[in-house]
Image (cartoon, rainbow, N blue to C red):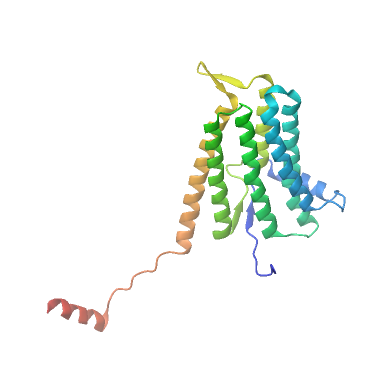
Amino acid sequence: MPTSNYREAKRVHTSVLAAAEKRALVWMARRLPARLNSDHLTALAGVAMAVAGICYWIGPGSRAAMLGAIGMLALNWFGDSLDGTLARVRHHERPRYGFYVDHVLDVVGILFLLAGFALGGFMTPVIAAGFLIAYYLLMVEIALATHAVGTFRISFWKFGPTELRIVLAVGTLQLLRSPFVTIAGERMLLFDVGGVVAIAALLVTFVASAVKNGRLLYRLEPLPVERTASGPLKALESRAWSS
Protein backbone atom coordinates (compact mmCIF):
# COMPACT_ATOMS: atom_id res chain seq x y z
CA MET A 1 0.00 0.00 0.00
CA PRO A 2 1.51 3.40 -0.95
CA THR A 3 2.40 5.77 1.89
CA SER A 4 2.40 9.00 -0.14
CA ASN A 5 -0.71 10.32 1.66
CA TYR A 6 0.47 9.33 5.11
CA ARG A 7 1.72 12.09 7.38
CA GLU A 8 4.00 10.94 10.18
CA ALA A 9 3.14 12.26 13.63
CA LYS A 10 5.43 14.81 15.24
CA ARG A 11 7.80 13.14 17.70
CA VAL A 12 8.11 14.80 21.12
CA HIS A 13 11.07 13.59 23.16
CA THR A 14 12.20 15.97 25.88
CA SER A 15 13.65 13.64 28.50
CA VAL A 16 16.76 14.52 30.49
CA LEU A 17 19.01 12.34 28.33
CA ALA A 18 17.24 12.88 24.99
CA ALA A 19 19.76 15.22 23.38
CA ALA A 20 22.85 13.23 24.38
CA GLU A 21 21.12 9.98 23.46
CA LYS A 22 20.24 11.28 19.99
CA ARG A 23 23.85 12.24 19.27
CA ALA A 24 25.07 8.82 20.43
CA LEU A 25 22.47 6.97 18.36
CA VAL A 26 23.27 8.90 15.18
CA TRP A 27 26.98 8.21 15.74
CA MET A 28 26.31 4.47 16.11
CA ALA A 29 23.86 4.33 13.20
CA ARG A 30 26.45 5.78 10.82
CA ARG A 31 28.93 3.07 11.82
CA LEU A 32 26.75 -0.02 11.76
CA PRO A 33 27.57 -2.59 9.06
CA ALA A 34 25.36 -2.34 5.99
CA ARG A 35 24.18 -5.93 6.45
CA LEU A 36 22.37 -4.90 9.65
CA ASN A 37 19.05 -3.14 9.20
CA SER A 38 16.33 -1.70 11.43
CA ASP A 39 14.38 -4.99 11.46
CA HIS A 40 17.37 -6.77 13.02
CA LEU A 41 17.53 -4.13 15.76
CA THR A 42 13.78 -4.30 16.42
CA ALA A 43 13.95 -8.08 16.76
CA LEU A 44 16.95 -7.76 19.07
CA ALA A 45 15.01 -5.38 21.32
CA GLY A 46 12.03 -7.72 21.55
CA VAL A 47 14.10 -10.82 22.29
CA ALA A 48 16.22 -8.95 24.85
CA MET A 49 13.18 -7.85 26.84
CA ALA A 50 11.75 -11.38 26.86
CA VAL A 51 15.08 -12.79 28.04
CA ALA A 52 15.29 -10.08 30.72
CA GLY A 53 11.96 -11.31 32.09
CA ILE A 54 13.31 -14.86 32.20
CA CYS A 55 16.44 -13.65 33.98
CA TYR A 56 14.34 -12.02 36.70
CA TRP A 57 12.31 -15.21 37.02
CA ILE A 58 15.39 -17.30 37.79
CA GLY A 59 17.28 -14.40 39.38
CA PRO A 60 16.79 -15.14 43.11
CA GLY A 61 19.06 -18.17 42.85
CA SER A 62 21.58 -16.81 40.36
CA ARG A 63 23.75 -13.72 40.51
CA ALA A 64 24.66 -14.32 36.86
CA ALA A 65 20.99 -14.17 35.88
CA MET A 66 20.58 -10.81 37.61
CA LEU A 67 23.62 -9.40 35.84
CA GLY A 68 22.24 -10.93 32.65
CA ALA A 69 18.99 -9.03 33.19
CA ILE A 70 20.94 -5.75 33.27
CA GLY A 71 22.73 -6.78 30.08
CA MET A 72 19.41 -7.54 28.42
CA LEU A 73 18.07 -4.12 29.40
CA ALA A 74 21.12 -2.59 27.70
CA LEU A 75 20.52 -4.68 24.56
CA ASN A 76 16.86 -3.69 24.60
CA TRP A 77 17.87 -0.03 24.70
CA PHE A 78 20.34 -0.58 21.86
CA GLY A 79 17.81 -2.24 19.57
CA ASP A 80 14.71 -0.26 20.53
CA SER A 81 16.36 3.15 20.41
CA LEU A 82 18.59 2.59 17.40
CA ASP A 83 16.18 0.95 14.92
CA GLY A 84 14.31 4.16 14.06
CA THR A 85 17.50 6.24 14.03
CA LEU A 86 19.15 3.80 11.64
CA ALA A 87 16.14 3.94 9.31
CA ARG A 88 16.23 7.74 9.28
CA VAL A 89 20.00 7.94 8.79
CA ARG A 90 19.78 5.57 5.81
CA HIS A 91 16.55 7.16 4.52
CA HIS A 92 14.76 3.81 4.79
CA GLU A 93 11.84 5.12 6.84
CA ARG A 94 8.74 2.95 7.21
CA PRO A 95 6.80 5.10 9.69
CA ARG A 96 3.60 3.05 9.92
CA TYR A 97 5.33 -0.33 10.04
CA GLY A 98 7.94 0.88 12.52
CA PHE A 99 5.42 2.52 14.84
CA TYR A 100 3.15 -0.50 14.83
CA VAL A 101 5.78 -3.22 15.30
CA ASP A 102 7.70 -1.25 17.95
CA HIS A 103 4.58 -0.78 20.07
CA VAL A 104 3.43 -4.38 19.69
CA LEU A 105 6.82 -5.54 20.95
CA ASP A 106 6.74 -2.95 23.74
CA VAL A 107 3.45 -4.18 25.18
CA VAL A 108 4.57 -7.82 24.93
CA GLY A 109 7.98 -7.00 26.38
CA ILE A 110 6.59 -5.26 29.48
CA LEU A 111 4.37 -8.30 30.04
CA PHE A 112 7.42 -10.58 30.06
CA LEU A 113 9.31 -8.18 32.34
CA LEU A 114 6.57 -7.86 34.95
CA ALA A 115 5.83 -11.58 34.82
CA GLY A 116 9.52 -12.13 35.58
CA PHE A 117 9.31 -9.77 38.56
CA ALA A 118 6.29 -11.61 39.95
CA LEU A 119 7.51 -15.16 39.25
CA GLY A 120 10.93 -14.34 40.69
CA GLY A 121 9.38 -13.03 43.89
CA PHE A 122 10.69 -9.49 43.45
CA MET A 123 7.21 -7.97 43.13
CA THR A 124 3.87 -9.16 44.46
CA PRO A 125 1.49 -10.24 41.66
CA VAL A 126 -1.18 -7.65 42.45
CA ILE A 127 1.31 -4.77 42.17
CA ALA A 128 2.77 -6.25 38.98
CA ALA A 129 -0.76 -6.46 37.54
CA GLY A 130 -1.48 -2.87 38.58
CA PHE A 131 1.76 -1.72 36.96
CA LEU A 132 0.84 -3.54 33.76
CA ILE A 133 -2.65 -2.02 33.63
CA ALA A 134 -1.36 1.51 34.29
CA TYR A 135 1.34 1.07 31.63
CA TYR A 136 -1.18 -0.18 29.09
CA LEU A 137 -3.50 2.75 29.82
CA LEU A 138 -0.71 5.19 29.02
CA MET A 139 0.26 3.25 25.89
CA VAL A 140 -3.33 3.44 24.65
CA GLU A 141 -3.40 7.19 25.33
CA ILE A 142 -0.14 7.68 23.44
CA ALA A 143 -1.43 5.71 20.45
CA LEU A 144 -4.76 7.56 20.39
CA ALA A 145 -3.05 10.94 20.64
CA THR A 146 -0.67 10.00 17.84
CA HIS A 147 -3.65 9.33 15.57
CA ALA A 148 -6.02 12.09 16.69
CA VAL A 149 -3.64 14.93 17.60
CA GLY A 150 -0.72 14.06 15.32
CA THR A 151 1.81 14.09 18.17
CA PHE A 152 3.80 11.04 19.22
CA ARG A 153 5.01 11.72 22.75
CA ILE A 154 7.94 9.55 23.81
CA SER A 155 8.62 11.13 27.21
CA PHE A 156 6.67 12.85 29.98
CA TRP A 157 7.92 15.07 32.82
CA LYS A 158 11.49 14.88 31.42
CA PHE A 159 11.40 11.10 31.89
CA GLY A 160 11.39 8.53 29.10
CA PRO A 161 12.16 4.87 28.34
CA THR A 162 15.92 5.31 28.64
CA GLU A 163 15.66 6.84 32.10
CA LEU A 164 13.29 4.04 33.10
CA ARG A 165 15.82 1.40 32.03
CA ILE A 166 18.54 3.13 34.04
CA VAL A 167 16.37 3.23 37.17
CA LEU A 168 15.51 -0.44 36.68
CA ALA A 169 19.20 -1.38 36.24
CA VAL A 170 20.13 0.48 39.43
CA GLY A 171 17.29 -1.27 41.26
CA THR A 172 18.52 -4.61 39.97
CA LEU A 173 21.99 -3.94 41.37
CA GLN A 174 20.34 -3.27 44.72
CA LEU A 175 18.51 -6.60 44.45
CA LEU A 176 21.91 -8.30 44.46
CA ARG A 177 22.36 -6.96 47.99
CA SER A 178 18.78 -7.45 49.22
CA PRO A 179 15.31 -7.48 47.62
CA PHE A 180 13.90 -5.70 50.69
CA VAL A 181 13.86 -2.16 52.03
CA THR A 182 12.66 -0.86 55.38
CA ILE A 183 10.32 2.14 55.38
CA ALA A 184 8.84 3.49 58.62
CA GLY A 185 9.85 0.31 60.34
CA GLU A 186 8.10 -1.89 57.79
CA ARG A 187 10.04 -4.41 55.69
CA MET A 188 8.88 -4.30 52.08
CA LEU A 189 9.98 -5.57 48.71
CA LEU A 190 12.06 -2.94 46.92
CA PHE A 191 10.26 -3.50 43.63
CA ASP A 192 6.87 -3.31 45.37
CA VAL A 193 7.76 0.17 46.56
CA GLY A 194 9.03 1.12 43.13
CA GLY A 195 5.98 -0.46 41.53
CA VAL A 196 3.54 1.57 43.62
CA VAL A 197 5.41 4.78 42.78
CA ALA A 198 5.42 3.82 39.09
CA ILE A 199 1.68 3.03 39.11
CA ALA A 200 0.88 6.42 40.63
CA ALA A 201 3.14 8.22 38.14
CA LEU A 202 1.69 6.36 35.15
CA LEU A 203 -1.90 7.03 36.21
CA VAL A 204 -1.26 10.73 36.84
CA THR A 205 0.46 10.99 33.46
CA PHE A 206 -2.42 9.17 31.76
CA VAL A 207 -5.05 11.46 33.26
CA ALA A 208 -3.06 14.65 32.59
CA SER A 209 -2.38 13.66 28.97
CA ALA A 210 -5.97 12.56 28.33
CA VAL A 211 -7.40 15.79 29.73
CA LYS A 212 -4.93 17.93 27.79
CA ASN A 213 -5.58 16.16 24.49
CA GLY A 214 -9.33 16.03 25.07
CA ARG A 215 -9.47 19.80 25.64
CA LEU A 216 -7.29 20.44 22.60
CA LEU A 217 -9.48 18.31 20.34
CA TYR A 218 -12.64 19.95 21.71
CA ARG A 219 -11.26 23.38 20.82
CA LEU A 220 -10.37 22.12 17.34
CA GLU A 221 -13.77 20.48 16.84
CA PRO A 222 -16.34 22.35 18.97
CA LEU A 223 -20.05 21.68 18.93
CA PRO A 224 -21.89 23.71 16.25
CA VAL A 225 -23.50 26.93 17.48
CA GLU A 226 -27.29 26.70 17.44
CA ARG A 227 -28.95 29.29 15.23
CA THR A 228 -31.74 31.35 16.81
CA ALA A 229 -34.91 31.97 14.90
CA SER A 230 -35.21 35.45 13.40
CA GLY A 231 -37.26 37.42 10.89
CA PRO A 232 -40.39 35.81 9.40
CA LEU A 233 -39.64 32.45 11.07
CA LYS A 234 -39.49 34.08 14.51
CA ALA A 235 -42.71 35.95 13.85
CA LEU A 236 -44.40 32.74 12.74
CA GLU A 237 -43.30 30.99 15.93
CA SER A 238 -44.63 33.91 18.03
CA ARG A 239 -48.06 33.69 16.40
CA ALA A 240 -48.11 29.95 16.91
CA TRP A 241 -47.46 30.33 20.63
CA SER A 242 -50.05 33.14 21.02
CA SER A 243 -52.86 31.18 19.30
Q: Nearer the viewer, residue 32 or 122?
A: 122
Direction from residue 195 to residue 222 in the image, left or right: left
- Extreme-bottom residue of the structure: 232
Q: Is residue 82 visible?
A: no
Direction from residue 89 to residue 172 in the image, left or right: left
- Extreme-left residue of the structure: 243
User: Which quadrant holds residue 224?
Assistant: bottom left
Name the spot of residue 162 as percent of width and height, x first: 68, 40
Name the spot of residue 114 as percent of width and height, x first: 61, 36
Name the spot of residue 150 as percent of width and height, x first: 58, 59
Q: Is residue 175 above or below residue 35?
A: above
> Where, quadrant-wise, is the C terminus in this rendering?
bottom left
Q: Is residue 63 visible?
A: yes
Q: Residue at x 63, y 41 (%)?
A: 110
User: Which quadrant holds residue 145?
Assistant: bottom right
Name the spot of residue 144 as percent of width and height, x first: 55, 55
Q: Is residue 37 above or below residue 164?
A: below
Q: Nearer the viewer, residue 210 or 126?
A: 126
Q: Residue at x 27, y 78 (%)?
A: 230
Q: Is residue 229 above or below residue 143?
A: below
Q: Residue at x 60, y 31 (%)?
A: 118
Q: Residue at x 57, y 42 (%)?
A: 157
